[in-house]
Amino acid sequence: MDAFGEGTKKEMAILKRSRDEEDESHLTRKPEVDVDHNTNVANHYNRLQEVGLAARSQSRIFFMRNFNNWMKSVLIGETVEKVRDNGQQHLSVLDLGCGKGGDLLKWRKGGIGHLVCADIASVSVEQCRSRYEDLRRKSHRDEGMFSAQFIMADCTKEPLADKFDRPGLTFDICSCQFVYHYSFESEAKADMMLRNACECLKPGGYFIGTTPDAYELVKRLEASHSLSFGNDLFQVSFQARGDYPLFGCQYHFNLDQVVDVPEFLVYFPLFERMASRYGMRLVTKQRFSEFFREKVKLSHHRSLMMKMASLEEFPGDHGGRPVSEGEYQHAREHCDRAGNAGIRLGTLSRSEWEAASIYLVFVFQKMS
Ligand code: SAH
């Protein structure tokens, strides 16, 4: 009997391609590995250079990054609204794995009162802090810039609560964007990250985030002839196929010179079960494709999408970049369809969509 109960054990088996009913060895946890992946991850993110808008707009993943940012904006915006609807005014938020502070503007737009930013990469935390100071200097008094604290910590190893400037601080929202999968190296690490996300949430508070969908990754791996899959923009490489341990199932993710790190499969039913130990109830789990289709129907989300240049205009000149024919075939076909001749539409290149569609959005709520 494992710690997660029979139901979860059965669901876990779905990830297995084939299994011997009597053989439960695949449910045993992988021993802790000696290599410190967290240090590698921190070093990797610390080395990343900030580039200006001009250079970014030339990047082959310019629209995908904007698209991901739009997804986060919608998720964050809607969650802030829900908390407000519950009568909460002075919102406090924990940004777990804040990176260089890519979401600071989203929090300012949400009019929150206090933000705690934590990340393992010291250089990123410092950049986040100076970005915040910049914003604060430039913001007008009536924009009401929130107060903030910055913490450099491996959130899979130590409790954050001991480090808060304000003892006993509790949060309305914990946001963990593109981070949680780094913790699934071991049960202890995944659990500490969850503890940090959930233990200081107020009753009714939300834990929101984005992470790769293990089903999608395994599906693509199993459809591939090798241990890797991807395209010109991104590659995912596994070490083995057919055996996917619950923790420590490592793959390497490489994204157009931006990300080049080891990551771990997050088997969602297990994540959900672990979160329930912290009183968390799953509210939403949606693939990026589903979330996008639902949210883009709302006009205020759509106009934000235009403002953020989250899709590329088609037909267009692709910013002068050379592109291969097949990259926009889907958009061309859409335009060619009867009745659509001459229209302009927003799209992502095929390669960008293949990368973006790996991810899912999750929302948990703390039960009172
Ligand atoms: N949330 C940010 C950054 C995502 S990149 C955004 O959406 O833009 C992933 C971030 O997770 C990196 O900044 C990395 O340093 C951080 N991270 C990875 N492992 C971590 C850990 N164990 N503890 C804290 N942060 C971690």
Image: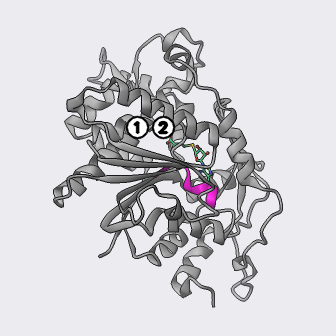
Say which quadrant the N terminus sits in. Answer: bottom right
- According to the image, label 2 marks what residue? 101
Query: Contact, CB < 8 Å: mark 1 with mark 2?
Result: yes
Q: Is residue 182 magenta?
A: yes
In the figure, 331 relative to 252: above or below? above
Determine the residue positioned at 27% across, 33% down.
302
Kindly state the secondary structure of the residue where label 1 is placed.
Answer: helix
Q: Which mark is residue 360?
A: none
Q: CA distance from mark 1 to mark 2?
A: 5 Å
What is the three-letter code of the residue carrying label 1? Leu
Q: Horizontal and vertical percent for residue 109?
A: 28, 37
Left/right placement of residue 23 relative to residue 72 reads: right
Of all residues, the one furthest to the right in this rendering is 34
Question: Within 8 Å of ligand 1, the CB of disc 1?
Answer: no
Q: Horizontal and vertical percent for residue 358?
A: 54, 47
Q: Horizontal and vertical percent for residue 27?
A: 69, 78
The stretch of residues the image draws in magenta is 176-183
Left/right placement of residue 209 relative to residue 350 reads: left
What is the three-letter code of the residue carrying label 2? Gly
